[in-house]
Image (cartoon, rainbow, N blue to C red):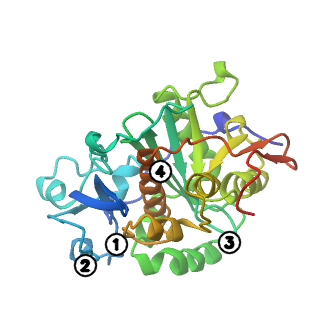
């Protein structure tokens, strides 16, 4: 029997309160093109150990002016931090994303009006089942990050032994396997949390027919929304939510705007002269780096439009004739 996300219980409690890594930097200058720079504040995530995440090295980059940064508490991103009254914890870990990836308004001279008020930058992790579901909410007018949604996802069809092996291989090397085990919840619950979050921002509601309002998903490729989410919904025995019926493949917009082909996030960042911040293939880091690409494209004057629309589980219409295949 298939269930909708809204039919799932919302009651999940943490098993521990041990905070691991993500960080924020003071303002840096990122080169966007040979002719100008885009000044932003950016988050920095690096691989860390479970014993002392603050000891991890910061990647060197000549264009960065990096002050002291604090890793973000990942229990906080899951709403599970129990140490908000601990001064030592607050001194060591960041608990706010409001200043991350902030864009200088003076750099928006080429920005044009958009069809949407907000963009939801999504980058899933997990080949067998979804393991991580991060979304960065970007204001289309200011280009600033409004909020961040982040959940680790516990597979439903894998044995505990296989899950442990999988997570050790995937997240152990990044130092976030412990926080994954402590916070991961089933996919159905993740979507329930996500719908609550969307509703908080007035971007979704049942009265709207379950579609997004004034917002659109932005992905680096079609795989996330076209393939993986429907697969996971089938595995989790739930209906595909109607807000996953259309999306923006940033690679296709990039191709048509800059007239050059970029096969992935790393290529786009290299061509825009954006240094990689954090760990590639850690979903929350990749979502933030894709956000930086989106910010640069918006500042350069790109029109960010829907590139794909789903008519059924099997039929997807691609709206750009010139696209990455």
Tell me the residue at 87%/50% (across/down): 314
Distance between mark 4 and mark 3 Cα atoms: 43 Å
Left or right, 210 with respect to 198, comes to right
The residue beneath circle 3 is: 159
The quarter of the rendered structure image containing the C terminus is bottom right
Neighbour tally class for label 4: few under 14, some 14-19, many 20 plus, Cα within 10 Å: many
Whether residue 23 is visible to the viewer of this picture, yes or no, is no
Distance between mark 3 and mark 2 Cα atoms: 35 Å
Residue mark closest to the camera, 4 vs 2: 4
- First-in-chain label (3 vs 2): 2
Tell me the residue at 58%/80% (across/down): 165
Proximity of marks 4 and 2: CB atoms separated by less than 8 Å? no
Residue mark closest to the camera, 1 vs 3: 1
The residue beneath circle 4 is: 297
Proximity of marks 4 and 3: CB atoms separated by less than 8 Å? no
The residue beneath circle 1 is: 46
Distance between mark 1 and mark 2 Cα atoms: 7 Å
Residue mark closest to the camera, 4 vs 3: 4
Position of 57 relative to 4 (above/below)? below
Residue 190 in the image: x percent, y percent?
57, 47
Residue 298 in the image: x percent, y percent?
46, 45
Residue mark closest to the camera, 3 vs 2: 2
The residue beneath circle 2 is: 57
Residue mark closest to the camera, 1 vs 4: 4
Proximity of marks 1 and 2: CB atoms separated by less than 8 Å? yes
């Amino acid at each position: 029997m298939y269930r909708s996300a809204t039919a799932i219980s919302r009651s999940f409690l943490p098993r521990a309160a041990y905070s691991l890594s993500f960080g924020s930097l003071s303002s840096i200058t990122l080169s966007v093109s040979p002719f100008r720079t885009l000044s932003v504040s950016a988050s920095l995530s690096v691989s860390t150990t479970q014993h002392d995440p603050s000891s991890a090295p910061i990647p060197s980059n000549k264009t960065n002016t990096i002050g002291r940064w604090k890793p973000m508490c990942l229990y906080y991103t899951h709403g599970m931090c129990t140490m908000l009254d601990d001064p030592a914890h607050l001194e060591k870990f960041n608990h706010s994303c409001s200043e991350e990836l902030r864009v200088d308004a003076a750099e928006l001279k080429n920005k044009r009006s958009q069809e949407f008020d907000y963009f939801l930058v999504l980058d899933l992790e997990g080949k067998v089942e979804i393991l991580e579901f991060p979304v960065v909410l970007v204001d289309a007018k200011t280009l600033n990050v409004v909020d961040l949604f982040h959940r680790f996802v516990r597979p439903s069809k894998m044995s505990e032994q296989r899950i442990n092996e999988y997570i050790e291989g995937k997240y152990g090397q990044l130092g976030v396997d412990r926080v994954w085990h402590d916070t991961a919840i089933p996919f159905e619950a993740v979507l329930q949390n996500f719908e609550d979050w969307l509703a908080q921002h007035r971007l979704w509601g049942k009265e709207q027919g379950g579609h997004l309002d004034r917002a659109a998903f932005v992905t680096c490729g079609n795989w996330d929304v076209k393939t993986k989410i429907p697969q996971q919904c089938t595995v989790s025995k739930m209906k595909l939510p109607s807000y996953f019926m259309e999306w923006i493949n940033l690679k296709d917009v990039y191709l048509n705007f800059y007239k050059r082909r970029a096969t992935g996030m790393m290529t786009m960042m290299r061509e825009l002269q954006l240094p990689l911040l954090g760990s590639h293939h850690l979903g929350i880091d990749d979502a933030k780096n894709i956000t930086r690409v989106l910010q640069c494209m918006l500042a350069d004057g790109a029109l960010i439009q829907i590139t794909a629309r789903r008519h059924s589980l099997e039929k997807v219409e691609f709206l750009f004739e010139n696209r990455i295949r």
